[in-house]
Image (spheres, rainbow, N blue to C red):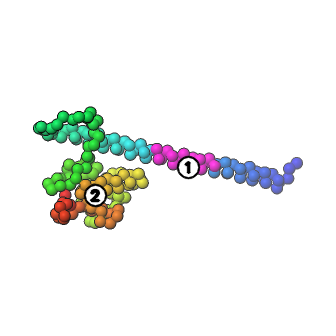
Amino acid sequence: MVSLPEELQAREAAARQRVEELQAEAAELAVRLEKARADLSRLEITRETVMQVLAELSAAEEAPEVEVRDAPEPKQASVPHGIGVMAVPPWREGLVVGVLPDVYRDIVEIVADAAGPLQAKQIVPRIGLEATTAKIEGTRGKLKRLVERGWLDEDTPGRFTLARHDGDAGRANSR
């Protein structure tokens, strides 16, 4: 016959082993969950990018064609449709925010309505996106593109304002 302390010790060892097994399973599930989240994030970004490209291509097809006169014939095969299309045109006098793709237009309007500089993480929820790292980084990229093209300014790193267009050094900076 087994003594009560020995029985309790055996049950404790079995319970400890089960806890360790469950902890190992939980760690494995955490790794799998993180991989699944990363896959989901990549797919969401891909879907958004494809939708944006399709919208831009659709808008480009609807734009009136410009008559080209005396243009030399291309010597190489033409570039596939959509490659090289500039989604965010450089700002210039007389250009309105309506020429921008929807998400860029929304970003510029949000920044224009803000009382002060905004960060990407403040803009993401205002354009209807979940505040995940992927969405914030994607929006930061769009903000940087808008800065490069003269629609926005980034006076302090990571803080964006509407570009000031005051004719400085030949670069127009306002909407």
Q: Amino acid at mark 2?
A: Val
Camera-nearest label, 2 or 1: 2
Q: Is residue 35 magenta?
A: yes
Among the 4 quarters of the image, the one containing residue 110: bottom left
* Count of picture labels: 2
Q: Is residue 38 left or right of residue 142?
A: right
Magenta highlight: main SS: helix
Q: Nearer the viewer, residue 16 or 157?
A: 157
> Which residues are drawn in magenta?
24-39
Residue holding disc 1: 30
Residue 159 horizontal/vertical position (percent):
32, 63
Q: Is residue 120 left or right of residue 33?
A: left
From the viewer's perspective, is residue 78 above or below residue 49? above
Q: Is residue 72 left or right of residue 47?
A: left
Residue under the point 20% across and 50% down: 98
Looking at marks 2 and 1 on the same chain, the residue that comes earlier in the sequence is marked by 1
Q: Amino acid at mark 1?
A: Ala
Residue under the point 24% across and 57% down: 150
- Mark yes or no: residue 125 visible: no
Residue under the point 34% across and 44% down: 49
Q: Nearer the viewer, residue 41 or 74?
A: 74
CA separation in Å, label 2 and label 1:
39 Å
Among the 4 quarters of the image, the one containing residue 52: top left
Q: Nearer the viewer, residue 7 or 91?
A: 91
Residue 72 horizontal/vertical position (percent):
17, 37
From the viewer's perspective, is residue 128 above or below residue 158? above
Tag 1's secondary structure?
helix
Q: Is residue 116 magenta?
A: no
Residue under the point 27% across and 51% down: 104
- Mark yes or no: residue 68 visible: yes
Using the image, tell me which numbered label, if any, was put on residue 147: 2
